[in-house]
Amino acid sequence: MASNRKVMVLPGDGIGVEVMAANLQLVDWLAKHKSLAFDISEDQVGGAAYDSYGTPLRDETLADAMASDAVLFGAVGGPQYDELAFELKPERGLLALRKEMDLFANLRPAIVFDALVDASTLKPDVVSGLNIMILRELCGGSYFAEPRGIDDQPNGQKKGYDTNAYSTREIERIGRVAFDLARKRDGRVTSVEKSNVMMSGVLWREVMNNLHEQEGGDVSLGHMYADNCAMQLVRNPKQFDVIVTDNLFGDLLSDCAAMLTGSLGMLPSASLGAPDPDTGLPKAMYEPVHGSAPDIAGQNLANPLAQFLSFAMMLRYSFGQAAEADLVEKAVADALASGKRTGDIMAPGCEQVGTDGMTRAVLEAMNALAR
Ligand code: NAD
């Protein structure tokens, strides 16, 4: 079926290949049952690309990714590549894509499905029904800003240092994404920094307030210090809708929020760039949070749900297909409610299935929902 929705598929390595193959069955289902087609191109990345071409990301692959409306990514890596030079490691392919596409906004939803409430280490009443979004700035702050380094000191000691710098433009562009996300959700943004002790935090809060005054009147904006936010995330996570924060705090808080949901095999993510001036579409890459899981690769054991939920994010954020995104997310919830479980989320009284069985359960749920 012809389509002007150009999607680049990069399965990568290990279970990335398996969960992507499963994902493509959902793509086929949407084409058949909802007349929603994508123009798909597929290529290798990571270790697979190294094996074929001697590099984790070919220039041609990057150019194709840049020309696509969205990139759907699996996972990369594996122990057989551990001894490779730094620049040839599979993960360099992923990082190069993120950098070259200038994907500055990292969206990590933390959703607790009813059927998985007991998988969290927190009490069921604290996490049941949880659906929050952590938005992390991905291209600036202390992981990139200069100066940074390790210098020799006159006293014979060394000094290691990083800089947590943010410009008005960097804060505004992530703030806009936060307001846009909130508009599609519950309309509430919590901006997180440490303006009590950090100058970058003082500017962050000031710029967020200005942006809210100028462009965000239709959403509510609150502020929280990062240390308090970490505490609130485990005390009462349901108080949040969208949390927006810098690179460093986002790294910590998104992992903390991820654990609320209990399993790595359930966590999707999206990384977005600036909207294209012609199409209004952001450059975007969608990928599960988990890696290539070499310990279970090739054994039909991988949970494909994080990949499916990443695909649902692609439908929602790159193509505005909210109904189809809802359908995929609801089908995942229904498949879980039917008692089917991959090993990573297995619970007493449930039926253990493989990647193929879980995929079938989701497709059956989609069939039932479409009736
Ligand atoms: P991992 O996420 O691959 O696996 C951690 C553990 O979780 C393993 O026991 C694995 O079996 C399990 N697991 C992960 N995803 C699962 C799923 N969908 N279903 C069932 N179980 C799942 O992390 P790791 O073991 O630290 O790393 C393995 C390789 O992946 C390394 O080479 C690492 O660099 C790479 N990695 C890649 C990405 C990425 O591509 N985005 C992210 C993290 C790690």
Image (tube, rainbow, N blue to C red):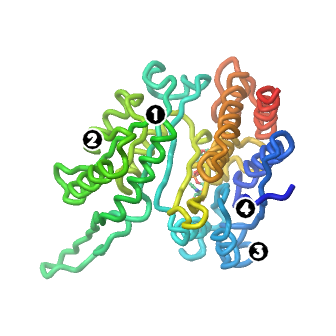
Identify the residue position indicated by label 1 in the image: 186
Residue 12 in sight in this render: yes
User: Label 3 near label 4: C-beta < 8 Å?
Assistant: no
Identify the residue position indicated by label 4 in the image: 6
Q: Nearer the viewer's eye, disc 1 or disc 3? A: 1
The tag earlier along the polypeptide, 2 or 3, is 3
Residue 26 at x, y = what percent? 78, 43
Dot 4 lies on which element? strand
Circle 1: residue type: Asp
Identify the residue position indicated by label 3 in the image: 52
Residue 9 in sight in this render: no
Q: Nearer the viewer's eye, disc 2 or disc 1? A: 1
Rounded to the nearest whole Å, what is the CA distance between mark 1 and mark 3? 46 Å
Within-10-Å neighbours for mark 2: few <14, some 14–19, many 20+: some
Horizontal side, residue 67 vs residue 367: left or right: left
Q: Is residue 44 above or below residue 88?
A: above
Rounded to the nearest whole Å, what is the CA distance between mark 1 and mark 4? 30 Å
Between residues 11 and 154, which one lies in front from this camera angle? 11
Rounded to the nearest whole Å, what is the CA distance between mark 4 and mark 2? 39 Å
Circle 4: residue type: Lys
Within-10-Å neighbours for mark 3: few <14, some 14–19, many 20+: few
Residue 145 at x, y = what percent? 33, 70
The tag earlier along the polypeptide, 1 or 3, is 3
Identify the residue position indicated by label 2 in the image: 224
Circle 3: residue type: Ser
User: Label 1 near label 2: C-beta < 8 Å?
Assistant: no
Between residues 262 and 113, which one lies in front from this camera angle? 113
Circle 2: residue type: Met
The tag earlier along the polypeptide, 4 or 3, is 4
Q: Nearer the viewer's eye, disc 2 or disc 3? A: 2
